[in-house]
Amino acid sequence: MKIAVTGGSGFIGRRLIAHLQLQGHELINISRSPKAVDPAIRTVTWDQLQSSPLELEDLDAIVNLAGESINQRWTAKAKERIVQSRIKAAEQVAQLVERMANKPKVVVNASGMSIYGTSETASFDERSPHHQVDFLSGVTQQWEQAADRIQGTRIVKVRVGLVLDGKEGAFPKMAMPYKLGVGGRIGSGKQWLSWIHIEDMVRLIDFCIQHEAIVGPVNATAPHPVTNKEFGQALGKAMHRPNVFPLPAFVLKLIFGELSTLLLNGQKVLPRVLLEHGFSFKFVTVDKALTDIV
């Protein structure tokens, strides 16, 4: 297949491109910069596509992963960048698809599980309503509204959970206290953590591209979420480190500001659509995922 990827230089994007290369697909990286993410992959800029959308004719799929990282202190300016980068990327894809004579068969657009709001008792799947309770839930609603403007093709909105990888993303910071021997639960420890291994993350995007029956929202989370306390126990076991030093919520808020809500407010999100369509997770339990990563 011929697949274009935006956000190919990001955490998930780089791993996705490597995975799709191994599958033998022809790849195109769409970027603001002409700098290639991989010498073996053709890179086109948004400016080039503005003048010549023919660069992407006969495309099978577009995967839109572009967006400012949320892994930073949420100042007013940072919040604006986070929101606008996602909306702009989705709007650019919508404009591109509209101008293409031969439209791609599918657009896979990233989103986030924050769209459901937070709860220590409720479970959420793709049928659950949206709840805007904080900054991230508002961002994901605007993000998906922008993605809904992409017309004339199948749209899949991948609502990404906490992606576990040994080198990038949130995991290295979460593991640091355990490396120092002072790991433990965060806050109450009762908050849910809906996670997914990076390998399953890129595999499920490929799965969504290939399966024409998948349309709309898809929860990109493993089938067995855990509480923060359970995650800490599994991490301590995998790293052979103690899990006895709790980190109070107020300390996390002092260190990370509003970003701390990612770890203090949980969501139990289930991948109903993927399971119904037969996707096979390689890492079903957090113990297996963390043992592999560590």
Image (cartoon, helix red, strand yellow):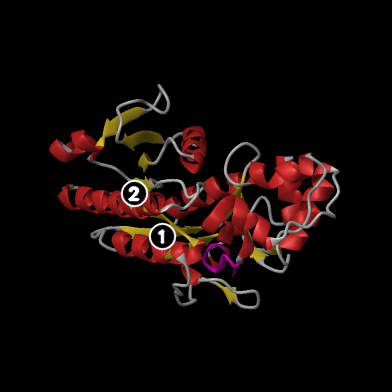
Comparing labels 1 and 2, the label whose residue is closer to the camera = 2
- Residue 118 placement: quadrant: bottom right
To which residue does mark 2 refer?
A: 85
Q: Residues within 10 Å of mark 2 (few under 14, many from 20)?
A: some
Say above or below: 104 vs 151.
above
x then y, percent, for residue 235: 77, 50
Query: What amino acid is labelled 2 in the image?
Result: Ser
Query: Which one is nearer the viewer's eye here, 139 or 269?
Result: 139
- Residue 47 placement: quadrant: top left
- Kindly identify the residue that appears in the image at 48 percent across and 48 percent down: 206
Residue furthest left in the image: 51
Q: Is residue 126 left or right of residue 178?
A: left
Magenta stretch bounds: 266-274
Say above or below: 45 vs 249.
above
Quadrant where the N terminus sits is top left
Q: Can the viewer see residue 242?
A: yes
In what element is the residue under mark 2? helix
Label 1 vs 2, first from the N-terminus: 2
Quadrant where the C terminus sits is top right
Say above or below: 240 vs 260.
above
Q: Residues within 10 Å of mark 1 (few under 14, many from 20)?
A: many
Is residue 270 found inside the magenta-colored segment of the image? yes
Q: Is residue 240 left or right of residue 107?
A: right
- Kindly identify the residue that appears in the image at 52 percent across and 52 percent down: 204
Query: What amino acid is labelled 1 in the image?
Result: Lys
Mark 1 to mark 2: distance in Å? Answer: 17 Å
x then y, percent, for residue 190: 72, 69
